[in-house]
């Protein structure tokens, strides 16, 4: 087993079962995938053959943790009840597919309140989350992502995540995925010297580090506090190398998968994953 779980969000255009060998070939020991098209409500069915091929490819690849990212259309707190219903059903489908594939969890942006206010957004989101958890297998987690707070996206402050966790009774299947570009855009200064360690301490105080399940490791094209979500290749944005070095060497993050979601996957993922490995100190 690798000492660290570093990897990427791998494209699945050539087949879900091809994503893990492709990830392993560019140095991934952890992988995130879409289990269905992220831009469509209608999910693809996973037939038994594909599930079996995926599981076989995974064990052959030597990749460690694999998890999914849910559809971008999901908005558990949409003002329109029909959209909320579709969102809950979509999330139920996602968590069910994860369970069949053996994935530990699905990362979700949860939603945007679209003018209803942060509190009402979290109230509705908690309702949808609890329903989705109640109707899906116990072996898969739902990992809420820290957002940049672009538009009316929920959960751009750690306090907001803590509140949703509380509204869900601290459900044991809920976890958090921390995105470096998002927290930076939301105003958490991970770029300054010692910044990442301080932000993780704050996360621990407010949410609890034991809820952290995954890290999205992205540099940012947009400034601290801009609340605009634009990923950049590692070391080429406004966050910079020190944060990523601190991330891959942080003792508390040893069991946590750290994946890049940077642009131009086909040509640049290998560079970004190798860059992460290069920062790891013996
Ligand atoms: Zn992310
Ligand atoms: Zn993003």
Image: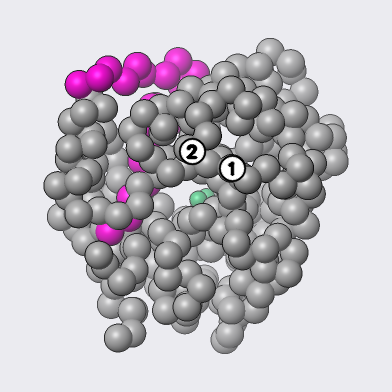
- Residue 227 marker: none
Please give the name of the residue rendered at 75% of the width and 64% of the height, measured from the top-left corner: 206
Please give the name of the residue rendered at 59% of the width and 42% of the height, measured from the top-left corner: 173
Q: Position of residue 116 (x, y in %)?
A: 84, 32
1 and 2 marks in contact (CB < 8 Å): yes
Residue 1 visible within the image: yes
Q: Could you say which is closer to the camera, residue 217 or residue 95?
A: 95
Q: Which residue is mark 2?
A: 140
Q: Position of residue 74 (x, y in %)?
A: 58, 29
Q: Earlier in the sequence, mark 1 or mark 2?
A: 2
- Residue 173 marker: 1
Q: Could you say which is closer to the camera, residue 17 or residue 64?
A: 64
- Magenta part of the protein: which range? 29-49
Q: Is residue 236 left or right of residue 182?
A: left
Q: Is label 1 in a helix, a strand or a loop? A: loop
Quadrant housing the N terminus: bottom left
Q: Position of residue 227 (x, y in %)?
A: 67, 55
């Amino acid at each position: 087993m690798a000492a660290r779980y570093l990897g990427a969000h791998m494209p699945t255009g050539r087949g879900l079962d091809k994503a893990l060998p492709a990830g392993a070939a560019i140095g991934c020991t952890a992988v995130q995938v879409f289990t269905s098209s992220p831009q469509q409500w209608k999910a693809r069915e996973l037939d038994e053959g594909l599930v079996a091929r995926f599981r076989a490819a995974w064990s052959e690849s030597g990749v460690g943790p694999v998890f999914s990212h849910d559809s971008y259309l999901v908005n558990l707190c949409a003002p329109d009840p029909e959209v909320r219903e579709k969102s809950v059903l979509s999330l139920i489908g996602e968590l069910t597919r994860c369970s069949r594939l053996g994935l530990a969890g699905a990362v979700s942006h949860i939603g945007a309140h679209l003018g209803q206010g942060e509190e009402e957004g979290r109230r509705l989101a908690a309702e949808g989350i609890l329903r989705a958890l109640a109707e899906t297998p116990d072996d898969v987690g739902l990992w809420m992502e820290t957002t940049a707070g672009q538009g009316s996206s929920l959960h751009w402050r750690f306090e907001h995540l803590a509140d949703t966790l509380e509204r869900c009774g601290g459900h044991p299947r809920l976890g958090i995925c921390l995105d470096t570009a998002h927290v930076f855009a939301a105003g958490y200064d991970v770029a300054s010297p010692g910044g990442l360690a301080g932000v993780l301490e704050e996360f621990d105080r407010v949410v609890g580090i034991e809820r952290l399940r995954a890290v999205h490791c992205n540099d940012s094209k947009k400034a601290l506090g801009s609340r605009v979500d634009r990923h950049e290749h590692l070391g080429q944005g406004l966050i910079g190398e020190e944060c990523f070095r601190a991330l891959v060497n942080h003792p508390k993050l040893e069991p946590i998968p750290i994946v890049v979601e940077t642009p131009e996957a086909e040509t640049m993922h290998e560079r970004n994953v190798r860059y992460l490995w290069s920062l790891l100190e013996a």
